[in-house]
Image (cartoon, rainbow, N blue to C red):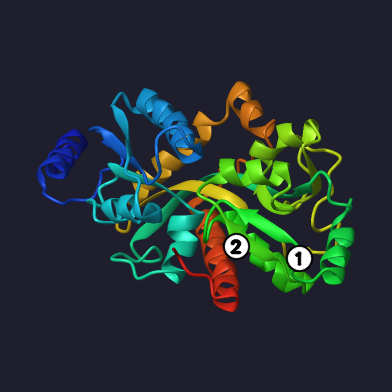
Amino acid sequence: MLPIRTIMLTLALLCALAPGAPVCAQDYPSKPIKIIVPLAAGGLADQLARTAAQRLGEASGQSVVVENRPGGAGAIGAEAAARSPADGYTLFMGGLGTNAVLAHLTRLTFDPAKDFVPVIHVATFPNVLVVHAGLPVNSVAELVAHAKANPGKLSYASQGNAASGHLVGEQFKQTAGIAMVHVPYRGAAPAVQDLVAGHVQVMFDSVTLQAPLIADRKTRALAVLTPLRVAALPDVPTMIEAGYAQMQSGTWFGLLAPTGTPREAIAWVNNETRKAFAPDAVRQRYLAQGTALPLGSPDEFAAHIAAERTKWGAVIRQANIKLD
């Protein structure tokens, strides 16, 4: 019988030389890692990717590069990641749009449900229902009553067609049985500007962006779309408290990998990404903005994506939402 050391060296050599061979647990990672972000640099997804990349690089001793590939509502970067080798060295910072919504809106050259495996749900930036400061409502119940008394006269802003704020706005209309006019913008900034000015009256926006405006009384918060109240807005009730338990939403992001990526690589990235967001200074920075950091198992992330895909698919079909 060959000595154990000889066997192990032989296996390691075979692992290194065999083209397309699975990642060997004891050798991963042994070369640079790339994280594809389907959105522009500087945004929420990019910030999360760079926080994770720093830790992955420190833990592996390898370079970890964040590659921004925006365009096509995220489809360009997603396709590039889906078509990459499933060897553990290409990761994808996916999210609500690319992995739960886009396939309901357009024909894709990849299948978000089949071409990716979840690694870890990094963060959710929850939504908050806000209204123009001059609108005479102070609760969700009052907003619904006002909308029913003035059918079609209220307008709600969104960050764009099929954006998170649009989807949840349509869900609110369907759930509450009210009529509001959708006004899409090219991004959150111009939408918020018109909300503050009173050109639109309602918006579902992220807690992170709205918290300063709420504090300055430029907008009024009616409810957060989270299971529990958020630390950034402790006096704002949840939609559950308002009687709309099914209305929980936010923009979320997490790491995925091409289908076929070895389990050892997924487990390593999952573990090290948790450590990236473990330091108190890092966690508190996000939590203070109302951000949730699930950082669970790949199976938990898979269940979350599946639930989101089903929920928003139903909303999109009922509202007949189309991309521009």
Residue 50 vertical position relative to residue 170 in the rendered view, above or below: above
In the depicted view, which residue is nearer to us: 51 or 158? 158
Mark 2 lies on a secondary structure that is: helix
- Give the amino acid at mark 2: Leu
Describe residue 49's horizontal placement relative to residue 260 as left or right: right
**In this rendering, the label closer to the viewer, 2 or 1:** 1
Identify the disc placed on residue 167: 2
Describe residue 285's horizontal placement relative to residue 142 as left or right: left
In the depicted view, which residue is nearer to us: 40 or 33? 40
Give the x, y percent position of residue 139. Answer: 88, 54
Q: Mark 2 or mark 1: which comes first in sequence?
A: 1
Locate residue 242: give its quadrant: bottom right
Residue 145 vertical position relative to residue 75 in the rendered view, above or below: below
Quarter of the image with the N terminus is top left
Identify the disc placed on residue 153: 1
Q: CA distance from mark 2 to mark 1?
A: 20 Å
Give the x, y percent position of residue 84. Answer: 24, 51
Give the x, y percent position of residue 49. Answer: 43, 36
Quarter of the image with the C terminus is bottom left
Describe residue 252's horizontal placement relative to residue 242 as left or right: left
